[in-house]
Image (cartoon, grey):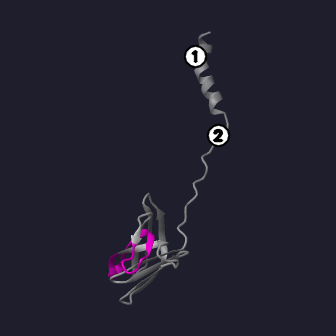
Amino acid sequence: MKNIIFAAPFLALIITSCGEKTEAPAATEEKLGDYSALGTEPGWTVDIKGEEIAFTSQEGKKINLPVDRAKKTDAGWEIRGFSDRDNINISITSGAECSDGMSDRKYADTVKITAGEVGTREGCGGEIIEGGDEAP
């Protein structure tokens, strides 16, 4: 009788561990997609298309780099590109409305870039939510 009482907890453990295992569904990685942003004084543009970043400054500096990392964050996106000569970090704050200061347009996002010799610049990006129908 003592053997049955002693074995009962282990038997319950074995029975419950033999059930079907349910796996958590695989997390789907969210992708940014094509994205454009701009800034003024001094002027700059950045376009992210596929896996490429193209930055152009008013002063004529052009940086074309592959996307090294595009990470979704609580605030928006962090995108990075670099090579042996250039680098760029792009921080997108989604839903933080932004005006470019030169037009009546308002954009869905605020964008901050840090690009090699160019330094840090701030501007707007994403969908135009007021004042025009054209993308940046």
Is residue 26 shown left or right of residue 58? right
Q: Is residue 65 above or below residue 15?
A: below
Tag 2 residue: 21
Q: Label 1, label 2: how many angstroms apart (C-alpha)? A: 27 Å
Kindly indicate the quadrant of the structure image that contains residue 5: top right
Q: Which residue lies furthest to the bottom in this view?
A: 60
In this rendered view, identify the residue nearer to me: 42 or 84. 42
Q: Which badge, 1 or 2, is on the more N-terminal residue?
A: 1
Q: Is residue 112 magenta?
A: yes
Q: How crowded is mark 1: few (under 14 residues within 10 Å), some or many (20 or more)?
A: few
Q: Which x, y percent locates residue 70? A: 48, 67
Q: Is residue 8 magenta?
A: no
* Quadrant of the drawing holding the N terminus: top right
Which span is picked out in magenta?
99-121
Tag 1 residue: 6
Is residue 17 shown left or right of residue 97? right
Kindly indicate the quadrant of the structure image that contains residue 33: bottom right
Q: Is residue 57 above or below residue 99?
A: below
Q: Which x, y percent locates residue 106? A: 43, 72
For the residues labelled 1 and 2, say whether their Cβ atoms are less than 8 Å apart.
Answer: no
Prevailing secondary structure of the magenta residues: strand
Q: Which x, y percent locates residue 78? A: 43, 66
